[in-house]
Amino acid sequence: MWGAIIGDIAGSVYLFVPFETEEVELLQNNCFYTDDSVCTAAVAEILLDNLPAAPTLQRWGRNHPNRGYGTMFRNWIASPDPQPYHSYGNGAVMRVSPAAFLNRSHPLEEALAATDRVTKITHNHPEGMKGARAATHAIWLAFQKYEPKDIRKTIEREYEYDLSKAVDDIRSGYSYSNTCQQTVPEAITCALESTSFEDAVRNAISLGGDSDTLAAIAGPIAEAMHGIPDHLVAQAVDQSLSGAPDIVKVMERMYKTAV
């Protein structure tokens, strides 16, 4: 979803450089797309065209090298026989939003099945699978116009995540983590507490952690809740994705797909 890609781009310049304030300028000139955007586009193509998941994700990674991939995923991209590696890293979560978007008018079970399909090829640890499902579930509920308090209750009940802390409380004690366990609950909270798409992305970046991925997880939930201003999509395309027409093309295809 564009929410994931814009969140990724907005957070790219704050990675490892904590900026613990909500007064964050979105889409600065030096922003860039990372592995979160590449993998989101790959998942969109996999689901749109019913392609084999592992080789398609590998192809996208190889076509967009040096985009901040973790060591294990980078090795997986290069492998002649890619196998899941029992990861619970947040790379499981940042790429799954197309599963929710393309199934937003379908039963939840179909969105979760699509999520499992594109997650188990790498992040087959129970926490990795759970994190990806929780993000998809939250997006799907937001598309059904559930209230934030009801989304919160559902995610807490179904996935045993603690979503009781407010963003301000999370921020005061948060530190960098790339695990699902310490990324997914926080990112979901950033979206559920937001008043707009931009507010959700700023919330995520302001935590001072894995900023691009936090925002790439919060962004699609917020998009389903609030929508995205057209000018942000246009700015991201013109400013940060001019060298990635394949990402733009698959995203445009996805949004034109009737459901």
Image: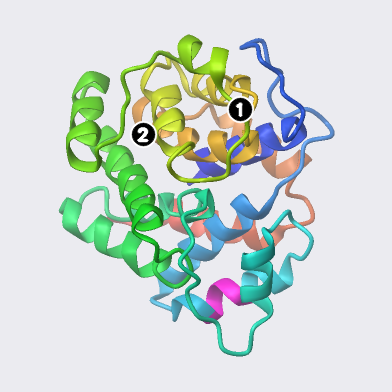
Furthest residue toward bottom? 80
Instruction: Give the number of the disc on residue 22.
Output: none
Amino acid type, mark 1: Ser
x and y percentages locating residue 148 in the rendered image: 27, 21
Instruction: Give the number of the disc on residue 175.
Output: 1
Q: Main secondary structure of the magenta part?
A: helix
Asked if one can make out residue 169 in the rendered structure from this viewpoint, the answer is yes
Residue 112 higher or lower than 162, as above or below? below
Segment colored magenta: 55-59
Q: Earlier in the sequence, mark 2 or mark 1?
A: 1
Q: Residue at x 27, y 37 (%)?
A: 143
Question: Element under label 1?
Answer: loop
Report which residue position mark 2 lands on. Answer: 224
x and y percentages locating residue 203 in the rendered image: 54, 19
In which image quadrant can residue 215 be found? top right
x and y percentages locating residue 120 in the rendered image: 39, 69
Q: Quarter of the image for the C terminus: give it.
A: bottom left
The colour scheme of the drawn protein is rainbow
In which image quadrant can residue 141 be found? top left
Label 2, label 1: how far apart the Cα atoms are: 27 Å
Amino acid type, mark 2: Ala
Question: Element under label 2?
Answer: helix
Relative placement, left or right, of 31 versus 167 is: right
Looking at the picture, tell me which residue is in the foreground, 20 or 108. 20
